[in-house]
Image (tube, rainbow, N blue to C red):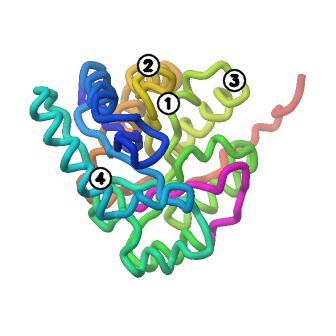
Amino acid sequence: MLPLIDTHCHLHAGLDDGPRDWEEAVEMCRIGWQDGVGAVAATAHQNPSWPGATSAQIRASTRELQTRLHQARIPLDVYACGEVMIGPELLDDWTAGRLMSVADSGRYLLIEMPHGVFLDIGDLVAELVALGVRPILAHPERHPELLFGADTVMKLIRRGCLMQVCADSILGPDRQVHRQLRHWLARGWVHLVASDGHSSTSRRPELPAAFDQIADWTSPAVAERVCCTNGMAVLEGLPLVVPHPERPKRSWFAGRR
């Protein structure tokens, strides 16, 4: 089995709402490594609520974490990453170099909607792509406008946006979410699966169970793509080619009982 790749896990002690200290951050990494994770994007929120999470601080924190992992003999590769909240200054902040891209490669940018708000980001996605950086939308399944909005999701993907789904959405109890995510996976609309881990207890990094569930819903090949190979390409800053989204044809008996 290929190593799992976690492209979104909050591991910076004290920079945001992730681990409280380095001991917990290292423990989270230990959990991931024991679960089969080979590399992880050590992520910190970049929004007005966490002004200390600058790109410079995220870089320094990632170096510190990698040193501590080496001392603890945990052979996990960590990459710097910001989770950028969408706002009116995002393009200016990107152009000015104030935002941390995924793995600091300048090729991918992890973005999230403001809390409890859905925005039409089609034009933003197109502008970022034109600037040479491909956006990855974190946890799109948390927004009903996307979870049940096939046309909206397809338009964003066609413009160049990648969809990163959280493992806890796949493993959670909500069957309605499961049903929609199974459709997404079958249609190739899920490009990455990440833990979005925040602690070693209440929000643990969990990828193996999500891998198994995806393999059961679809196939091991799909699970490897969204949990392993796509993530490694993103962390290495390599181009990622995804299927052009098409709405499945509606059968003549659809909706009949």
The alpha-carbon separation of the residues under discs 1 and 2 comes to 8 Å
Left or right of 37 on screen, residue 139: right
Give the quarter of the figure containing the C terminus.
Answer: top right
At label 4, counting other C-alpha atoms closer than 10 Å, the crowd grade (few under 14, some 14-19, many 20 or more) is many
Span shown in magenta: 109-123
Q: Is residue 82 above or below residue 231?
A: below
Q: In what element is the residue under mark 3?
A: loop
The answer to whether residue 191 is magenta is no
Quadrant position of residue 66: top left
**Kind of residue at badge 3:** Asp
Residue named by callout 3: 174
Left or right of 110 on screen, residue 154: right
In this rendering, the label closer to the viewer, 4 or 3: 4
The answer to whether residue 120 is magenta is yes
In the rendered structure, find residue 167 and report the number of the disc placed on it.
1
Residue named by callout 4: 80
Label 1 with label 2: CB-CB less than 8 Å: yes
The alpha-carbon separation of the residues under discs 4 and 3 comes to 32 Å
**Kind of residue at badge 2:** Ala
**Kind of residue at badge 1:** Ala
Q: Position of residue 103 (x, y in %)?
A: 29, 55
The alpha-carbon separation of the residues under discs 4 and 2 comes to 25 Å
Residue named by callout 2: 209
In this rendering, the label closer to the viewer, 4 or 2: 4
In this rendering, the label closer to the viewer, 4 or 1: 4
Give the quarter of the figure containing the N terminus.
Answer: top left
Q: In what element is the residue under mark 1?
A: helix
